Amino acid sequence: MSALFLSLAASLLVSSSESVPASGGPTATLTQATDVMRKRLMRFDANKDGRLSRSEFESIASARTGQNAANRGKMFDRLDQDRDGALQKQEIDRLLAARVRRLDRNQDGQIDREERMAVRQGQRN
């Protein structure tokens, strides 16, 4: 599950120029990177209720990671810690923050251009 969610989170981080903070600087703090990924995830909130349902989440995971339905379902079940059938902001933020910390390879509290490029390289391989 960790590798699958890391792949999903990484693809959300590097999929456009929005991964760089609005200031235009070459780095993003961990908080900024988490915010970018959360905003991108929430674009898939079709009914705009502030949560991601199983079907909304599975559509993201399918498009971004190419995983089969069984794996997407298992991942959703692990992420939905309160078992209410939807991913709440707190569940999403906790998991995104943990994944962003893993992307910060040099542990300096920021995601820099080299770290973003490493994610892109990993996605191509």
Image (cartoon, rainbow, N blue to C red):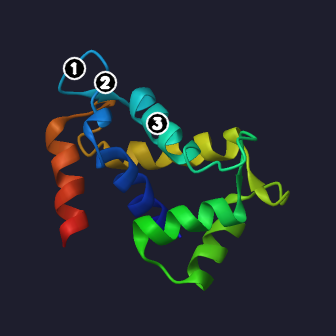
* Residue in view at x 44 percent, y 68 percent: 63
User: At which x and y percent is residue 48?
Assistant: 70, 41
Q: In the current view of this chain or complex, which residue is farthest to the front? A: 47
Comparing labels 3 and 2, the label whose residue is closer to the camera? 2
For marks 1 and 3, the one nearer the N-term is 1
Mark 3 vs 2: CB contact within 8 A: no
Q: Secondary structure at mark 2?
A: loop
Image coordinates for residue 8, horizontal then vertical, percent: 43, 60
Outermost residue to the top: 23
Q: Amino acid at mark 1?
A: Gly
| SS for dot 3 | helix
The amino acid type found where label 2 is placed reads: Pro
Residue 36 location (% of width, % of height): 43, 35
Look at 20% across and 20% down and name the residue there.
25
* Residue farthest to the right, as pictured: 84
Q: Residue at x 71, y 64 (%)?
A: 54
Q: Tell me, yes or no, whether the two marked residues, 1 and 3, touch with CB atoms within 8 Å.
A: no
Q: CA distance from mark 1 to mark 3?
A: 17 Å
Instruction: Classify mark 2: residues with Cα within 10 Å, few (<14), some (14-19) or many (20+).
Output: some
Point out the tag, 3 or 2, that comes first from the N-terminus. Answer: 2
- Left or right? Give the position of 111 relative to 84: left
Q: Residues within 10 Å of mark 3 (few under 14, many from 20)?
A: many
Image quarter where the C terminus lies is bottom left
Residue topped by disc 1: 24
The label shown at residue 21 is 2
Question: What whole-number distance in Å separates the C-alpha atoms at marks 2 and 1?
Answer: 6 Å
**Around disc 1, counting alpha carbons within 10 Å, would you say few (fewer than 14), some (14 to 19), or many (20 or more)?**
few
- Residue topped by disc 3: 34
Q: Are marks 2 and 1 in contact (CB under 8 Å)?
A: yes
Examine the rendered structure and indicate whether residue 61 appears above or below residue 45: below
